[in-house]
Image (cartoon, grey):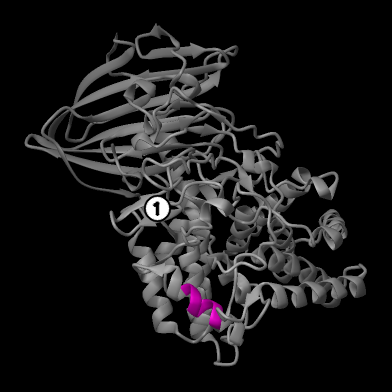
Amino acid sequence: MARIEDYGLIGDLQTAALVGRDGSIDWACFPRFDSGACFAALLGTTDHGRWLIAPRSDAWSPGRRYRENTLVLETEWETDGGKARVIDFMPPRGKAPDIVRIVEGLAGEVEFDSELVIRYDYGSTLPWVRRMDDDTRVAVAGPDGLCFRSAVEHRGENMRTIGEFTVREGERVPFTLTWYPSNEELPERIDAEQALQDTVDYWTSWVGACEYDGTWKQAVHESLIVLKALTYAPTGGIVAAPTTSLPEKIGGERNWDYRFCWLRDATLVLLAFINAGYLEEAHAWRTWLLRAAAGDPAALQIMYGVGGERRLTEMTLDWLPGYEGSRPVRAGNAASEQFQLDVFGEVLDAMHQGRVHELERSPEAWSLQRRLLGFLEHAWKEPDDGIWEVRGGRRHFTHSKVMAWVAFDRGVKAVEEFGRAGPVERWRKVRDEIHREVCERGFDHELNSFTQSYGSKRLDASLLVIPLVGFLPADDGAVLGTVAAIERELYRDGFVYRYAGDDEHAQVDGLPAGEGAFLPCTFWLADNFALQGRLDEAEELFERLLSTRSDLGLLAEEWDPASRRQLGNFPQAFTHVALVNSAFNLDRQHEATPEQRAQPSGY
């Protein structure tokens, strides 16, 4: 099976697909990111759905790339007889999602195979396939229909749609696959070449508006494209990843569905978009948040569906064997029912950043923030499930309390610096109370470090955000001690792990130990190095992180230094946003005076 990083991403701002190096699309969900997959070979076998277009035999691929500043994937193939290119993309759409593939002859001639295997509902449902005319086939099951169009002659064989063709120098052979509701008329034909031009124009125009022109311009642009591709355009929601159940340990059970909108991840993406000058995306996300979070602040969830849906019931897909045998395969996410204090801080910080960057003022947004703070005045004292969504029971997690402090700090700043109306004296009092408690109960003097939870001896990489959000300055002794302790205990093989797999692990986490190094936390360590004035070390670590990207610039959530491969859902918004924000932070630190370097820079 292909490694996770062997896949390329294509998308249309409503859903996405993963294309392997071998020319097989092994994952695609229609019509939304969180819909049932019609190609699920990524989590099973070819019998669970895929679409292959590749040379018939004796071929090798000298390389693949995205066309500059776009999400148009180009894979070149060579054989003894010639050279060809496969162009894969999904045009940003109106109503219907399309996958378009164009095979271009570059030299000589190359024989290709096309194999289309459609299996709806994550590989469990075989469709009824009909031939409509010479170049059109439709596959229907329940509410789903797919319309496949190609001038290449295809035939049915073993529940698959098979074709062979030869492409010669100068020829271009298009294929289109369009989803539609099965009760409606067939979708209109699209011109593949015009769709390609429209897609290129869209992405190059979007990237051209980016205001970042720093040291890591190409890497930042590539990551911003990924973040934009993970945005559900109709609502402004941002999914954490387009996949489910890619494992954090090969063969393990840490396999989660990430095709939803985490408030934490999305607010960090918001910060990246604001920094890069994309205020339209920031405004759309804020509007999505206001809709999703409407109602009782006590009912605020950590994640929602792309349309703001609240019920994300978790179930296992027992018919799928999982990526490299990693089971269970899950759809839905039970963590949506967890209580996590830190999301209040992230939401209030995102709103604060919107004010700092003069995002259009919204009375509804400030009303939401006041209601959230009103609830948090008492709720911050309660234990919670923590940033890592542990399933071992609630605790007083230090990171959660720090982010509750952030919520009140940003509320105070809204009144003091931006003239918003609110009970600032009461908020200031709560902010100071949280700060005192965290410093007293979350810090272990024997370890000279903050700890994962009150009274614990465990370290946790989430503590690296303490100086990034301004809770304490980077040169404070407690922060220096915490960073040193994390370097000593959680920084291995050049990367940061979230926490130790010690004897207490199963009790806290609720799952067996074992996972890769956590890439976002490693970016946070680079940020801490920069704030401490250790710029050479910060840049060395940042460059090491960049080296873990795939040849297409894509990153999952984790990295296994031993096997040198990516782990977890892919590509991961949390990781790409950490890359973007670290690039901004490092550039700022280069320009800062020694006095300015210890100031918080965001994360």
Prevalent SS, magenta region: helix
Image quadrant containing the C terminus: bottom right
Closer to us: 323 or 157: 323
Q: Is residue 353 visible?
A: no
Residue 95: image quadrant is: top right
Closer to us: 377 or 240: 377
Crowding at dot 1, Cα within 10 Å, few <14 / some 14-19 / many 20+, comes out as many
Name of the residue lying farthest toward the front: 503
Residue under the point 70% across and 36% down? 309
Q: Which residue position is annotated with label 1?
A: 554
Closer to us: 436 or 46: 436
Q: Judge whether residue 485 is colored magenta.
A: yes
- Dot 1 falls on a residue whose secondary structure is loop
- Magenta segment, which residues? 481-486
The location of residue 578, given as percent across then percent down, is 51, 63
Closer to us: 214 or 574: 574
Residue under the point 77% across and 44% down? 291
Q: Is residue 198 left or right of residue 303?
A: left
Q: Is residue 213 above or below residue 102?
A: below
Name of the residue lying farthest toward the bottom: 594
Q: Is residue 469 above or below residue 59?
A: below
The location of residue 181, given as percent across then percent down, is 58, 18
Image quadrant containing the N terminus: top left
Residue 292: image quadrant is: top right
